[in-house]
Image (cartoon, rainbow, N blue to C red):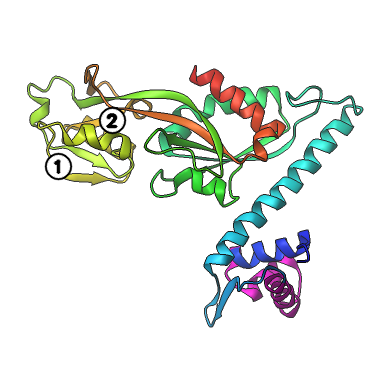
């Protein structure tokens, strides 16, 4: 099989992003016929149909989704290679090694994080990172940690690193590498001064009760079914602070909680969740990703 050239990968990514050959042609400054010819050539080389063509545009097939994920990751590696080589050149070619050495780090660093990590964990790490490496430009996307979550963004080549909830029942996907940054416990949150907080309605949100808390959740007879499903942890905390109900929330979500709420420890059997990072094996050795992981560990520790 002939290898796909970077320009062919860029065409595939553009068609996938724009969901159409005409729009991709405009974005790339090419003719539609040239885009169509390139895609047909890629399909021939790969031996699979990558897009369903229709009146509404081009939709990736299952094979196309896989091809797009690989294409984004390959193109990103080419960008990282160029950035690191240029950084080494600016420093006189004195090396740099895996730890960073004298190589100047610059360029975009794409990060996917769920809301509470993006609010309370990531900013401190990025502050330290950009102070040490002002040429790095963080690009952060807030992603709901449901379904494929932040790990899916990394797998699909849309993020270099994801801040994810990981653990024995939600392991790092086999295609990725990662590690735990912090283990956070859950606590009962209720209006301050309420005489019987456990009698209040339960407020919850989709990202909260995941596989590592369900067993504990099911064993708590005092916890009723949630009567309100909020959009995110911020909305839950707001409802609790106004006296509407109670909630069981992880520690990251409770940073900066208003004085109108009270946080009660759930004891030694409280549920916990592990918050960590995930990245691809290829990017795990890139200098910018390694530098970010060091800063995340520093602020989480």
Counting from the top left corner in percent of width and height, residue 78 is at 76, 48
Q: In which quarter of the image is residue 59?
A: bottom right
Query: What residue sits 49% from the left and 21% below the top?
Result: 300
Locate residue 77, reporting x and y percent: 72, 46
- Which residue sits at x=57%, y=69%? 19
- Queried whether the magenta region covers residue 27, the answer comes back as yes
Is residue 141 shown to the viewer in this render?
A: yes
Q: From the image, which quarter does the N terminus lie in?
A: bottom right
Q: In which quarter of the image is residue 5?
A: bottom right
Q: Earlier in the sequence, mark 2 or mark 1?
A: 1
Residue 42 vertical placement versus 190 (above, below): below
Q: Is residue 202 above or below residue 270?
A: below
Q: Depth check: 230 or 39 in front?
A: 39
In magenta, the rendered stretch is: 17-44
The residue beneath circle 2 is 249
Q: Which residue is the extreme one toward the right?
A: 92
Q: Is residue 255 among what the camera can see?
A: no
Provide the residue designation for mark 1.
225
Local SS, label 1: loop
* Residue 215, horizontal then vertical, whole percent: 23, 35
């Amino acid at each position: 099989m002939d290898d796909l050239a970077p320009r062919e990968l860029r065409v595939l990514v553009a068609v996938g992003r724009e969901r159409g050959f005409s729009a991709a042609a405009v974005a790339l400054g090419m003719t539609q016929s040239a885009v169509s010819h390139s895609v047909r050539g890629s399909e021939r080389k790969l031996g699979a149909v990558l897009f369903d063509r229709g009146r509404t545009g081009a939709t990736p097939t299952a094979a196309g989704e896989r091809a797009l994920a690989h294409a984004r990751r390959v193109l990103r590696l080419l960008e990282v290679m160029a950035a690191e080589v240029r950084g080494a050149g600016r420093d006189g070619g004195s090396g740099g090694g895996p730890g960073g050495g004298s190589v100047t780090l610059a360029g975009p660093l794409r990060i996917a994080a769920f809301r509470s990590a993006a609010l309370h964990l990531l900013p401190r790490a990025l502050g330290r990172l950009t102070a040490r490496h002002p040429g790095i430009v963080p690009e952060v996307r807030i992603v709901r940690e449901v379904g494929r979550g932040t790990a899916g963004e990394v797998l699909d080549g849309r993020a270099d690193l994801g801040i994810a909830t990981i653990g024995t029942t939600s392991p790092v996907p086999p295609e990725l590498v990662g590690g735990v940054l912090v283990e956070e416990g859950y606590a009962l949150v209720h209006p301050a001064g309420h005489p019987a907080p456990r009698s209040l309605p339960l407020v919850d949100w989709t990202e909260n009760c995941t596989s590592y808390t369900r067993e504990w959740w099911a064993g708590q007879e005092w916890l009723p079914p949630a009567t309100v499903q909020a959009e995110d942890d911020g909305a839950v905390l707001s409802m609790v602070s106004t006296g509407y109900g109670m909630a069981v929330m992880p520690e990251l979500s409770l940073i900066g909680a208003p004085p109108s709420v009270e946080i009660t420890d759930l004891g030694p059997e409280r549920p916990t969740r592990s918050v960590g990072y995930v990245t691809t094996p290829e990017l795990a050795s890139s200098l910018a990703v390694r530098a970010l992981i060091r800063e995340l560990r520093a602020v989480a520790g």
